Structure formats: structure tokens, C-alpha cells
Amino acid sequence: MYQIIHESLSRQSKALALLHDLLEEEYTTLLARDTDGVVALEFSVQELIRQLAVEKCLVIRQLNGSRVLDYAALLPEEQASALRSCFAAIDESEQRVSRQASRNAQLSLALLDQSSRNLQALTSRAMPPKAETYGRKGGMRYQAHPQAALISGRL
């Protein structure tokens, strides 16, 4: 059982390092605004995350729901230290991946916001003015105020 868990943790550690590299590449692709490249990378990222979930489920099943560090405490010191170091590497890698994913999300949301504002600005310039602004004789039409007013005029 130790061998299965150790190999799975090792695969998880390597997969998280690869995931971090993919997320960094996605960030540079987002900066370059290459949508096709981002889509291709996103498929790879999602597949890698799926494989990581399978590996985590394997470890959970092998340990019958107990924690890796609890299991490591029951092993001889050499095996326990190997599991602890793998676990620490996985934890540190998960934090790095999480920070990079947050950066990517912030950048993609900022690009979305910028694009939507550009679209709104172009649309407002392309739309004709309201038809009710001018009357038949070319003068301005009176537009009632939607809010009620008791006093009007200047002081």
C-alpha cells in the first residue's frame, strides 16, 4: 500500500508542476490576446485537473478516508519522511498553482471588462439619437421630468 500511495503522490507533485507551467503559459497567451491559444491551453489544463482528481481519489480510497500524514506516522521513519516530503511538495505546489490561477482569472476578467466597455462605447456612437428629441418643426420637444417637483426655476 505504501508503494501505491507514494507513486500517486509523486505523480500528483509532477502534475502540479506541469499545471503551474501551463497556467504561466496561459497567462502569457492572455497577455498576447491569442484566444485560440487560450482555448487550447484551457483544454489541457482541464484534463490535467481531471487526472489530478483521479489521483487524489485513489489515495483517499487506499487510506480509507484517513490523512496521509496520519498514515505516515504509522510507517518506519524512512518511508514516513518520503511521504511527508511528497506531501509538503504537493502542498507548496498547490499554493503556487492557486496563486497563478488567481492571476489568470483577474487578467481574463479585466480583459472581458475592457472589451465590454469598448463594445458599449462603439455601440453608443453608432446608434442614432432618440427620435423624440426633435419635433416636426425642428425645435426641441418638451420632455417631462420623471420625478415629481414642487418648485421649479432658479433661486
Image: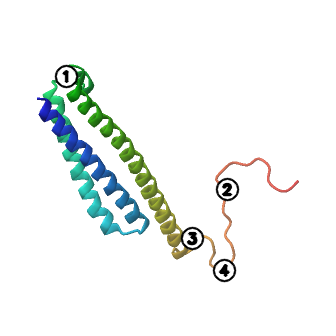
State the image coordinates of residue 48 (x, y, percent, origin top left): 23, 50
Judging depth in this view, the residue of 56 and 147 nearest the camera is 56
Residue 34 left/right relative to 149:
left
Q: CA distance from mark 1 to mark 2?
A: 80 Å
Local packing at callout 1 (Cα closer than 10 Å; few below 14, some 14-19, many 20+) is few
Residue where numbered disc 1 is placed = 75
According to the image, label 3 marks what residue?
Answer: 130
Q: CA distance from mark 1 to mark 4?
A: 94 Å
Closer to the camera in the image, 118 or 91:
91
Q: Secondary structure at mark 4?
A: loop
Q: In x, y percent, where is residue 13?
A: 26, 43
Mark 2 / mark 3, whichever is N-terminal? 3
Going 66% across and 63% down the picture, which residue do you hit?
143
Q: Quadrant of the N terminus?
A: top left
Q: Residues within 10 Å of mark 3 (few under 14, many from 20)?
A: few
Of the residues shown, which amino acid type is indicated by label 2?
Answer: His
The chosen color scheme is rainbow
Query: Vertical placement of 140 versus 98: above or below?
Result: below
Q: Residue at x 80, y 49 (%)?
A: 151
Tell me whether circle 4 and circle 2 mark residues in contact (CB < 8 Å): no
Tell which circle, 3 or 1, labels the residue nearer the N-terminal end. Answer: 1
